[in-house]
Image: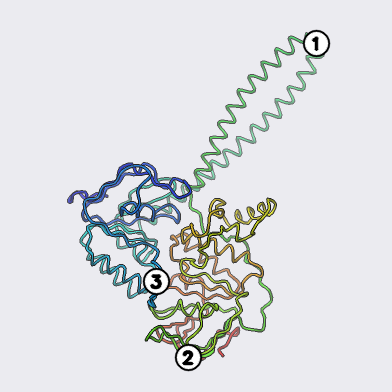
Amino acid sequence: MTSQLNRNLLSARRLGIDAQSGRTLFADLSLSLAARDRVALVGRNGVGKSALLEVLAGLAPPQRGSIQCHGRRVLVPQLLPSSTSTRSPGERRRQQLRAAFDAAPELLLLDEPSHDLDDDNLEWLLRRLADWPGALVIVSHDPRLLPAFCEFFVAAESGCRHFSGSFEQLVASLQLERDEGEQRYVRTLQRLHDDEQHNATLRRRRQRKKNLGRLHELKRCPSRAVLNAKRSYKQVSQGKRAVLQAARIGAAREWTRATRRALSVELPLRLASPELPAEAETAIATLQRASLRAGDRTLFEDLSLQLRRQRMAVIGPNGSGKTSLLEILVGERRPSEGRAICDPSRIGYIAQDASNFRRDESLLECLAPGAEAVALDALAVVLRAHEFPFALAERSLRSLSPGERLRAALIELWQRRPIPELLVLDEPTDHLDLLGAAALSTVLRRWPGGLVVASHSRSLLVAIGVDGYLDLGRSGLRSDEGDESSAKAVRFGDTGTAC
């Protein structure tokens, strides 16, 4: 990653970085950055990208190794600090980014900088990055942002490596690597299965020979001392053989476990689509001529909606009131004017960064408080079905990364009884890697209930399929063909009408 035309700005030697649980995130990692290097750090959720960025920024010490930097460093973290400001998360993120650019450090480190940004602000970010004269390290999953880079640092459980090339070449390389890893894993599992079958056959054959040998020895009537000597020899030789076989099979099992950890893991919820109760006659959420003001700004006004099991996308620029509208729909906020009615028992809501699930309890405790051993066995079956690591399920939801917490939140909603009829999601693909975002699209596409999604990701909205777009920036609602209609009188097919 070091440019030959510039001196080293940052050097890290044999870094070791551990998670809070003690799990090793990075081991024996060495890298260097020159004064004008531009690197994108990519990898799956949970591999430790944010932790590495904090160490490179000098905000956290590594557990092992050393790091030296010969200039000023500024880090813009992934999570925005708590604020009482009326500004939207996108507006606050742009403010943070602008302050970092204006500080003009020699090394700028950005953790998921495109989160919460609408298309206009993303264009602004891309222009600032193109003009940036110093060194840059950026963590991102955003396919709109990564094509601007040609140097990548790929972080994974199996190790870290440098990749030089276009983003398209990186995606192709990662896909090939994934496919080859899956094929090796399957071949090894098959070989392990064949070996164990072969060993089982040999054990049965030896047991039959042993039984026949005893009968023959008894017919010859040898002395007890001779019988004991032969028996002792066979036990020793067979014991040595069994130890060698167990060691070989154990090594193969350990290899498959390590390989499984290194393979890509898609978002969970592979279970069959849940059964929903018969749809009630009453609406799940209703707005009657609702208006909302923040300070001296009017975010939206005179908005009437009636939601049952429709699929609606809420779009609009930063600061247009998307998050506030969702909070009103789920009953966490009141409109400035008008009326809002909802049935919280029929709604499953996940806020941005899954912040409403940022609790001290673990997922296991949320699913079954005070569960006994028998109940825990049943929960383990659920976690395996959802491909959610048991170790993460035992940790507090607060300690999980936003992507991990989103997965846990979805599992909790899926297991809730009665199951929600309407999912309300605020920027659900934030903090998800490319594979996780694709898996989430599949999950939401198959979801049989109602869906309200606020997102800047047009690819997500197209993939999941929606009945209409509520565009707060244009003060109206469009069908999926793009026709505009009044926000005061909205119709979603035959399943719901405006008030």
Residue at the (68%, 29%) spot, across then down: 203
Query: Quick check: 344 above or below 235?
Result: below
Marks 1/3: CA–CA distance: 92 Å
Question: For mark 3, what is the residue?
Answer: 83
CB of mark 3 within 8 Å of CB of mark 2?
A: no
Question: For mark 2, what is the residue?
Answer: 302
Residue at the (68%, 54%) spot, across then down: 375
Whole-percent x, y for residue 493 in the image? 57, 84
Q: Is residue 312 left or right of residue 80?
A: right
Q: Is residue 405 left or right of residue 380?
A: left
Amino acid type, callout 3: Ser
Circle 3 packing at 10 Å, graded few (<14), some (14-19), many (20+), is few
Whole-percent x, y for residue 147 in the image? 32, 62
Marks 1/2: CA–CA distance: 104 Å
Whole-percent x, y for residue 126 in the image? 29, 68
Q: Earlier in the sequence, mark 3 or mark 2?
A: 3
Q: Quadrant of the C terminus?
A: bottom right
Question: For mark 1, what is the residue?
Answer: 220
Front label number (1 vs 3): 3
Give the secondary structure at mark 3: loop
Q: Along the line of sight, which residue is nearer the eye, 378 or 489?
A: 378
CB of mark 1 within 8 Å of CB of mark 2?
A: no
Marks 3/2: CA–CA distance: 28 Å
Amino acid type, callout 1: Arg
